[in-house]
Image (tube, helix red, strand yellow):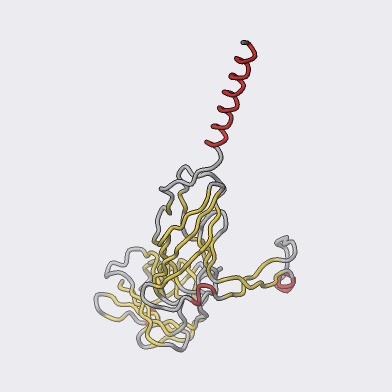
Amino acid sequence: MKNIIYILAGLCMIGIWACEQDDTSGTLSVDIKYLDKKQTTVTGLGGLFGEFLPSKSSLPIKFEILNVVAENGSSTEAVFEEVDVPTFIKKVTGQETPAELALKVDTVKLPAVSIEEFTGQLNVREGNRLLADKYHFDIKVSNVSGSAILKDALILEVKDFEIFGFSDFQGGAPVIERIGDSPDQILFTAFDEGVVIPSDEIDFVAQRKRGFKGVFVDDMPDGELWSVSFPVLRSNTFVYLKGEQREIDFALGKPGSYKITFFK
């Protein structure tokens, strides 16, 4: 009798262990999603986009782009086009001269847009040639318990240019206009209650390590003319209009001729 009891107890223990194994073998929750499926960037600029919410799913989760569709019919070839990405091939000390640093950098070819395998973030690489449009991404997610396809999981809106923020321009918000395909330049104009501010009363100071690196060309009758290389990466630019400081945070992606207008 005791043997039967021991055997039954043993079977129960095995059953309990098996159930625990099943409970911990893996779960892929039905409510997985991105925190904010709509993301925005400027063509030519790089960055990581999208925060994935795994809910109670077992980790790690792997991600794969299955399909991309442009909402307004643009070609999606530029999404998968390979771009040059600088990478360090030797240890950097921070004491290198520009010439020494150049010897420690090489370039590799990587897709303009890819997905980080274990975070699900879209990696958009600087130097991409994405056309202005809204790109809808179908993404496959997989873990130990299986896989699922998230239709329209992320929407990446790509713009030719963008104003990310600005300080108090009392006459109204700054305006960016792309006025031609060439030359690569910006004309900065400003108005004070509808009256043009002379170019000699417009002055710029920028945080330019990676952002606005324009080269002053000339004072024009309607503003200051600057030559730029594209993309014009995001940076805070301080604008002095008649000696009063304002601030604008902007980026320009698509090459061409632009006019940026301020209203003091």
Q: Where the C terminus falls, by quadrant? A: bottom left
Between 149 and 6, which is closer to the camera in this rendering?
6
From the viewer's perspective, is 248 left or right of 91?
Answer: left
Q: Residue furthest left?
A: 193
Q: Position of residue 11 (x, y in %)?
A: 59, 24
Between 197 and 22, which is closer to the camera in this rendering?
22
Q: Where the N terminus falls, by quadrant? A: top right
Q: Quadrant of residue 68?
A: bottom left
The mark total stands at 0
From the viewer's perspective, is 64 left or right of 219?
Answer: right
Q: Position of residue 17 (x, y in %)?
A: 58, 29
Question: Which residue is drawn at the image coordinates 74% and 61% (left, top)?
Answer: 91
Q: Residue furthest top?
A: 1
Residue 78, above or below 150: below
Q: Position of residue 74 (x, y in %)?
A: 41, 78
Residue 75, above or below 140: below
Q: Position of residue 123 (x, y in %)?
A: 53, 64
Between 62 and 227, which is closer to the camera in this rendering?
62
Question: Which residue is drawn at the image coordinates 57% and 32% (left, top)?
Answer: 18
Between 62 and 74, which is closer to the camera in this rendering?
62
Question: Which residue is drawn at the image coordinates 39% and 77% (left, top)?
Answer: 202
